[in-house]
Image (spheres, rainbow, N blue to C red):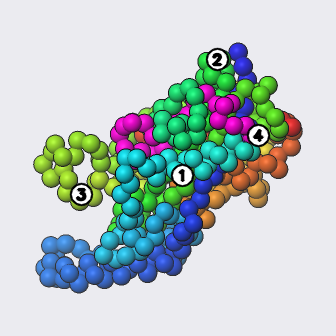
Amino acid sequence: MFTPVITGTGIFTPDQIITNAELVASFNAYVDLYNAEHAAAIEAGAIEAKAHSSEEFIVKASGIEQRYVIDKAGVLDPQVMHPLLRQRSDDEPSLMAEMALDAASKALAKAGKTAADVDAVICAASNLERAYPAVAIEIQELLGINGFAFDMNVACSSATFGIQAAADMVRSGSIRSALVVNPEICSAHLEWRDRDCHFIFGDVATATLIEREEAAEGPYFEIRSTRCATQFSNNIRNNNGFLRRSRPDGVADRRDMQFMQNGRKVFKEVLPLVSDHVAGHMADNGVVSGDLKRIWLHQANKSMNDFIGRKVLGRVPEPGEQPNILQDYANTSSAGSIIAFAKYSDDLKDGDMGLICSFGAGYSVGSVIVQKHG
C-alpha cells in the first residue's frame, strides 16, 4: 500500500470578467424588452411581469461580486443572454480540453513533474462538452500521457470524488499518479434570464496532481482520508441531454434545459447533510475541530460556507481559516474548493491539517482530510 499525496495544483482563469454592475445592466435591459414585448399579456394577467435585479440583491443573496467567463459579449447582449462560442472542428482541441491543459500544465510544473510521471487523467466536471469520446482522453492526448483516462460527473462534488478515485488507485498501487482536472464552462448551462440565478456561475478550470508520497519532490499534502456520499434529490437539476431530439418539443428552448434550482430547499437540506458528513468523517479519523488549520469549501454561497465553517470548527472561523473566493470567481461548480485550496494552502506549516469539501446536485458531498509535509 502506498500513501497518496497532493503535490501540485493549477488554475486556468479566463481573461474576461463580468462585474455585478455589468450583469445587472444587461439583465434589466432584457427585462424591459420582455415586459414591453408581452405588455398585453401582462396587462391581461396571463403572465407576470419580470422584475429588475440589483447589485445589492446579488451580494446579499450570494456574496458574489464578479465572475470570469469565456465569452461576456453574448451573455451581456439582452437579445442573446448566453455565451457565444466558436464552433470548433473535430480536428481542433475542444474548449474544455484546452482549459484543462492549461491548468494541468501548471499543476505538473508546481510538482516538478512531466507527463511521463502520470498514469491516469480524470476529467471530473459538471457539464461535459460532449458525450464521447471522453474529454479526459483528449486531455491525456494533448498532455502526452500514457496510461488511461475517463470522465466523471457528480456535479459540484466532482473534484472531491475524483480525488478519492485517484487516491484509491495510488494507494492500491495500480497507478503511480493521476491528474484530476475540473474544466467548468458553467456560463453555458446557466439561465442568464432568470433573476433568481442569473448571477451564480462563472468559468474556470483546475487541476490536482495526486501521486505516491515517495515521489514528491517538494512540499506536499498527504491525503489522510477521503469520504463521499450521495442522496437523490431533484432540487438541483438540468434536463439537457442526448435524448432531447427523441421527445416532443425536445429541442425547444425549454427552461429545464438549463440550470434549475429550488434554492430554499437546497439551503435547508444540504447544510445539515454536509455538516453531518464532515463531522462523521472527522470523528471516524480521530480529527477534532482544533486540529484543522484551514477548511476549503465548495464556493456556492457565502452564507452556506459561513454556516458550514461554524459547524465544522465549532465557532466562527478566524480570518483566513475558511477562505472564500466566490466574490471573485462566483460559483465554479466542482472547481471552487480546489481554487480555494490552490490559492490558500502554501502558507500552512509542516504538520498542519485541513479539509477540502465540496457538495451539490445529487445531492452529493465529498470531503478530503489532508496534512501538510515539508
Q: Residue furthest front?
A: 91
Among the 4 quarters of the image, the one containing residue 278? top right
Residue toward you, 42 or 346: 346
Q: Are marks 2 and 4 in contact (CB under 8 Å)?
A: no
Sequence-first tag of 2 and 1: 1
Distance between mark 2 and mark 4 Cα atoms: 23 Å
In the image, is 224 to the left or to the right of 141? right
Q: Is residue 117 magenta?
A: yes
The answer to whether the residues at label 2 and label 3 have Cβ atoms under 8 Å apart is no
Please provide the residue range marked out in magenta.
111-136
Q: State the SS at label 3.
A: loop
Residue 112's disc number: 4
Type of amino acid under label 2: Ser
Residue 270 visible in the shown view: no
CA–CA distance in space, label 2 to label 1: 30 Å
Q: Earlier in the sequence, mark 1 or mark 3?
A: 1
- Residue drawn at the location 63% of the way across and 52% of the way down: 11
Q: Is there a contact, CB below 8 Å, between mark 4 and mark 3?
A: no
Q: Which residue is mark 1?
A: 99
Q: Does 52 lie within the magenta span? A: no
Mark 2 neighbour density, 10 Å: few (under 14) some (14–19) many (20 or more)? few
> Where on the picture, by quarter, is residue 82?
bottom left
Q: Which residue is mark 2?
A: 172
Q: Residues within 10 Å of mark 3 (few under 14, many from 20)?
A: few
Which secondary structure, mark 2? helix
Q: Label 3, on which residue?
A: 254
Q: The residue under label 1 is which amino acid type?
A: Met
Which x, y percent locates residue 370? 73, 35
Residue type marked 4: Gly
